[in-house]
Image: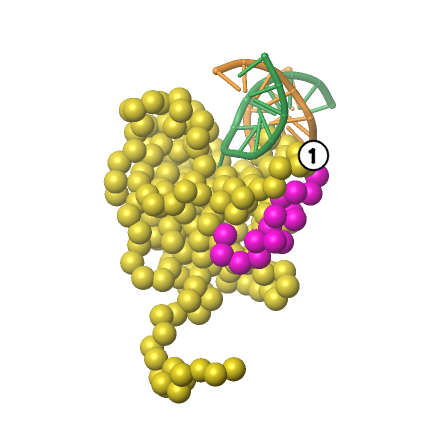
Chain colours: A yellow, B green, C orange
Amino acid sequence: MPSRPSESARRPAAPTWREQAVLPIAFYGRDTRVVARDLIGCVVTTGNGATLAAGRIVEAEAYGGREDPASHAARGPTRRAAIMFGPPGVAYVYLIYGLNHCLNFVTERDGVAGAVLIRSLEPLAGVALMARRRAAGRNSPGALSARELCRGPGNLCRALGIDRRWNGLSLRGPRLRVLARQGPRPPLIATPRQGVRAAAERPWRFLDAASGCVSGARAGAAAPGGRARRRV
DNA sequence: CTCTCGATGGACT
DNA sequence: GTCCATCGAGAGA
């Protein structure tokens, strides 16, 4: 295999997402909205080797503590929400509507509730595996495009094989890891959070302005022209 | 114990 | 736009 001699020399070679550092716990131990914004462009990975699946975060939402009526933590540290009051840097996974799971990252310091809901990813690795998981148990023959595989919180969990058993897992562990972003944060847009009735005016949903992998077609159609989106 | 309903997704009018 | 599958958490009796 002929290759140009000069290629083997030291070339800085832009690091790929695979070479990015695993985000430290301190990344999560900050204000939840800051963490949510900073997570856009970072990479979620699950599994290893043949089971590796990864995607770039393009949509996320911030959920606060007792002061945020839309948050599970609004009613204090109940059995489900207690993990949001615990130390940062772990996964909070719950079942919604009896059939979909939602992946969150716990934020803030121990004793203060906060979490970021990961809503959509742009697939980077393990596309075939994700497609297989998404196809399981569905009866529509149509193949899913790559951009659909991890669009929406429930779909994303299905594609990555995440369920309630993942609740409490470290975000730096062997099964689940989050890697730092390559380069600067992309331009973002902020909108109200999806599907919440309480505190609907808070623009705590953040999206990569350039990504076509974000969810929320309904909301977009429901508010023609006047979408409450603003650049951040 | 019962009752309600949800940080959704997919099929359908 | 509407309907609904499906189940655990939370609230209340």
Q: Which residue is mark 1?
A: A139
Q: Position of residue A199 (x, y in %)?
A: 37, 28
Front residue of this view, candidates A201 and A113 = A201
Residue A32 located left or right of residue A100: left
Q: Majority secondary structure of the magenta segment?
A: helix
- Say above or below: A100 vs A5: above
Chain of the residue that carries numbered disc 1 in the rendered image: A
Q: Is residue A157 magenta?
A: no
Say which quarter of the image contains residue A46: bottom right
**Residue C3 position in % (x across, y down):** 60, 15
Total labels: the figure holds 1
- Crowding near pointer 1: few (<14 within 10 Å), some, many (20+)? few
- Residue sitting at 70 percent across and 39 percent down? A137
Q: Position of residue A101 (x, y in %)?
A: 58, 40
Q: Which residues are magenta?
A: A123-137
Verify whether residue A126 appears in magenta: yes
